[in-house]
Each structure stands twice: as C-alpha cells, then as structure tokens.
Image (spheres, rainbow, N blue to C red):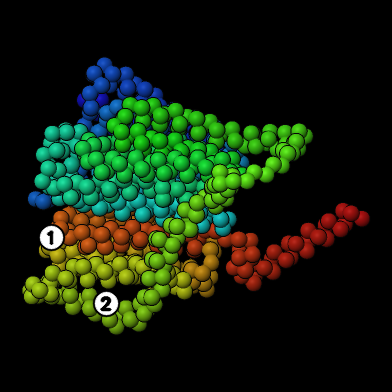
Amino acid sequence: MELAFWIQLMIGIPLIGFVLSLIIPESRENLLSKVAFYTAGLNLFSVLVFLVFWALAGFEAVNLKEFVLYRNPNFEFLIDFFFDRVGAVYVAVGALLTFLITFYSRYYLHREPGYKRFFNTILFFYLGFNITVLAGNFETLFIGWEILGISSFLLVAFYRSNYLPTRNAIRVFSIYRIGDVGMILAMWASHHLWHENVTFLKLSNTELVHEHILGHSGIGLFISVMLLLAAAAKSAQFPFSSWLPRAMEGPTPSSAIFYGSLSVHLGVFLLLRTFPFWENQIIVRVIIGLVGLTTAILSTMIARVQTSVKTQIGYASLTQIGIMFIEVALGLEALALVHFAGNAFLRTYQLLVSPSIVSYLIREQFYGFVPKEKSSKKGFSSKLVLSCYIWSLKEWNLDLLMNRLVFRPLKNLGHRLDFLTYKSVLLYFIPSYLIGLALLVAGIKIPDQYRVFLPAVFGFIALMMVLKAFSERNSARLSWILLILNHFWMVLAIAENELFAWPQVAIYLSGVIFFGVSGLLIIDWLKRLTGQHGLHHYKGYVTRYPVIAFLFLLSVLGLMGFPLSPTFLGEDLLFSHIHQDQFVLASIAALTFVMEGIVTIRIFARLFMGATVDREISSLSSEDLAQSKKQQLIKNTLASKANH
C-alpha cells in the first residue's frame, strides 16, 4: 500500500504543479519559477524515498490498477501503473534532470517573453513523461505519449512569432504522429491477441507470451513491427532522423530536456518495456539492430560536419541511441539502461554549456586562428571520403526522403480531392451519410456481398475528407468542417462493420461535437473580425488574441482525440469493433486519426502562430497603421529636437 501511494504521488505532484502554473499570472515571474522548481524538487524527493521503500521490498515489480474508466462485456479501459527496474532508471533520471533544468531555466530565461509559457510546458511535459514511464498498459502509456507530442510542438514553437520555429514544430509533430500509427495499430492487434487490454506485468510472463504467440505468429510479428515504428519515430531513428535538427529551434533548456536527455530516449524505453513480447522473434531483433546500426553510422558522419553546436550534439546523441537499439536487440537490458543514464546526463550538460562554449570558440578563432595547409589526395578512398562528407552535409537527404515518401504523396492526393467543396458536401456526402445512418437505425439488412465492403468504403470516405483538409488552403472553415464530418463517417464505417451500443457512439461523438462546434465558432469569429479565412500564410493572431488562441488550442486537442476529450476513449472503443482480420480497415482508421491530428495542429499554427514582421503589418487595420505612423512621427520629432 505504501508503494502504491508513492507511485500515485509521482503522478500527482507534476499534475498539481502544472495546474498551479496555469493559474499564476505571467507578471509573477518569481512565483512561477518557484512553483516549477519546488514541484520538480518535491517529485525528486518522492522518487528517492520510493526507491528506498522499493529496495526494502526486494526490488519486486509493482503493478497498480488505479481504476476502470469504462467497461462493457467485451471491452475494458483500465488506467494501470507498473514499476520495475526499467521504470526505476527512467523515473530517477527524469526527476533529477527535470530538477536541474528548472533550476537552470529560472535564470537563463529571466525576463524572456513567454517565461510562463515555458514553465507551463515543461511541467506538462514532465507529467506526460512520468505517465509514460510508469504506465502499466498500452492505453495508459498512450496518454503520456500524446502529452509528450503536444509538449514537443509547444516547446519547438516557443518563439511562436517567428516563421521557422513554427514550421519546424509542425514537422516534428507530424513525424511523431506517423509513429502514432504504429502505436495505435499495435494496441488494436494486441487487444485481439489477448482479448483484453493486456498489462505489462502479463507481458513479462515469458511462458504466457509464448503460449499466445505460438498459434498467432503473424499477429505477433505485426505488433512488434508497429512498436518498432513508434519507437523509431519517437527516438529519431532511421529514416525519421530528419526531425531532430528542426527540434533545436526551441530554447536551450528545452533542447536539453527533450532532445538531449529524456524524450528522445523514450523509443528505447518502449522497446525495453515490450522486450519480453518480441525477444523470441529473431527477425524483429535483426530489424531493430539494423535500424540502430544504420542510425549510428549516418548520425556519426552527420555530426562531424555540422556547423551548429546544438545540431552536432543532437546527432551525437542519436549515434548513442542507435547503439542502445542494438543493445536492446541483443537482450542487454542492464547495459542499455546504464547507457541511457550516461548519455542523458552527458547531452544535458553539453547542451546547457553550449552557449558558453560557442562564445569561447569564437573568441579563440578570432585571436588564434591558424589556417591548415591545403593538401590534395587522389584515389578511390579520398573520393569516398569526399562523397560521404558531401552527403553528410546534406544530412543524407533524409528530410527530402520523408517528403517524397510520406508528406508529398498525401498532399498530392489531397489536391486530387478538390471536388470536396461546400456544395458537394451538402449535395452528396451529407445526404449519403443520412441515408446510410437511416438504414442502420431502421435495421434494414444489406446483402452480405455488398455489406462486407461498406466499412472500408465508409472509412475511405473519412480518410478522403481528412486528406482534403490537409491540402486545403483557401478556407480554414471548410477544412475544419471536413475534419468534423470524418468522425461521423468513421462511426458509420465501424457501425456497419459490427453493430455496437449507442452509448459508445455518444462517448465518441460528444467530444467531436463539443470541440468541433467551439473551434468552428472561433474560426467564424476570426473571419468576421479580420476578414481573412484562408490558410496560405501564418497569421500570428496569438499576439493580439492570446485567450482566443488558447481556447482554439483546446478545441484542436479535443477534436484530434487528446486525453482531455471523451473522443480519446471513443477511439479505443471503435478499434475494439474492428476484427482481427480487417487490417485494411484498421490501417485506414489509424491513418485517419493520425492525419487529423496533423491537420488540426497545422490549422492552429497557420491562424495563430508564425507571422513575420511584414505579415503582421499587413494584417493591421487602417486605424492601427495610422496610429503607428503617428507614434513614429512623434518619435522622429523628439529625436530631431534632441539633436538640435
């Protein structure tokens, strides 16, 4: 009972600290920093005390079933926490580094615009990190996983009035969401394999895992590959390494805690946590090892030619994480944990002192620079070195690879759906949906030879709407409406696949309707106020309407199925009604939910973030321009008088 209390405390302390930081006014900088500092310090103390009790208990794995969020005869959504030596290392390292970062940031970000926002996000991130590493099942882990994704977006886009940080934050979040496809499909297949929301405690039972996989080797391989996809995207492993340099746009402390020490190592954590599940699948271990080896080789070469110290440290960290993937694949759990702790502390230190080192090197280069003698070598080896050097400067075109293989095809497909306009939606898609819903409610049975294709067809219509919203730039309102309609089509697809209770539909659609309507009202309000409704440029309205921006962010999170909305539970409910042999339908549903998250964040960013100076001026009204010209004239007059 004592151990359970301390686990609850490790979740509760960051949650209380985050809520308090939201309440404190931005002008109370000292109080805000103290709340963050004492939250991290108190949580560090609770972790150390817990480790003492855990050691006295014999280092036994602890599973804590908190509460059942929803239950029906075929489904149970359980909030579960689990603690073992993997969790112990991650929790201890996370607590100590978060404490150090909050202490450092109190002074490093002093008088920085967005001071409150930074500590809000850091505490939100720490809450998500603790939920992730203490999670006892996939559903609980996915809650923390989603919090980490949003925190990454907010911290990379910390300088939200600038174009480049905003654009890079969208790219980082987009690749995170690609990894979420793997996580969602792994949860779906795991539910059918175990016929329950399996806990990690059960996964640690080797005999039980072997018994379940023995007759379902295909499903076991599919789950393992999907977990690898999620881990590789989260840890920036090949071919997802291109997001790491983009993530360095945030402040140095956020780069240290996210992409040097904690967040970037969570892919390793996911593999360690699920190791008992795939340890007997040799092909999976080989693939994990090859992914780690490829990343280590490429990252080593890229790191050696970087001109930015933060990017160089980031790629150096990726090299070590690639080696950790190899260690996990070889079953060297203890070595991987020691390696994680050492790399996390080293990269945090390097990133925090990097501004001072850059200043020193600039001064040293200015006073003591001695040019090297030029030497020309010929032969195959020198050509190979030069080729690797050039490719490394281009970062092996990994960013271009992701664009060509993932984002550009999706965008091109969205452009082919330009027939999805207000008129076509009203005349064709809404009536079609109402007819399908009426047939379903009336209980009219469609012949089986046609009915078997309906779920995939309806799901594809939902995916079409999301892809069109992804490529839409002329109207934010149309894009948002298509995102709302895609949820209704997805419900119809699953209902045609397997009839389920209407209360489950209500759980899913309640969040969609509430947050969808609230977001639509904000978009219409902005259009009436500013006269702009397109998504061609980043408008940066957050500087003028910060409260509206926060409310719209909540609408975005709710519509995309973030844990604050009932839709998060509803998505899991819907997937429980997709049969284990319906890989196409499951893939369509997962891609739809993931793409919707990308689209909603893009809409938020284009409306409220990333405005350049010229665009900010062009968005001003004539009265604002006249006022600014008047103020400038007064300044010039006073300056001329002072000179005379």
Q: CA distance from mark 1 to mark 2?
A: 23 Å
Q: Are marks 1 and 2 in contact (CB under 8 Å)?
A: no
Q: Residue at x 24, y 40 (%)?
A: 282
Q: Position of residue 346 (x, y in %)?
A: 50, 30
Disc number for residue 343: none
Count how many numbered circles sit on residues in the image. 2
Secondary structure beneath label 2: helix
Q: Is residue 456 left or right of residue 97?
A: left
Q: Residue at x 21, y 62 (%)?
A: 585
Q: Quickly name the residue at label 2.
A: 430
Q: Is residue 16 left or right of residue 32?
A: left
Q: Quadrant of the N terminus?
A: top left
Amino acid type for the residue under numbered disc 1 = Ala
Res 409 seen here = yes
Residue lying at the far top of the rendered structure: 56
Q: Quadrant of the C terminus?
A: bottom right
Q: Position of residue 310 (x, y in %)?
A: 56, 41
Amino acid type for the residue under numbered disc 2 = Ile
Q: Residue at x 22, y 47 (%)?
A: 221
Disc number for residue 501: 1
Secondary structure beneath label 1: loop
Q: Residue at x 25, y 53 (%)?
A: 185
Q: Position of residue 535 (x, y in %)?
A: 48, 68
Viewer-proximal residue, 211 or 35?
211
Label 2 packing within 10 angstroms: few (<14), some (14-19), many (20+):
some
Viewer-proximal residue, 69 or 83?
83
Work out whether 624 lies above or below 41. below
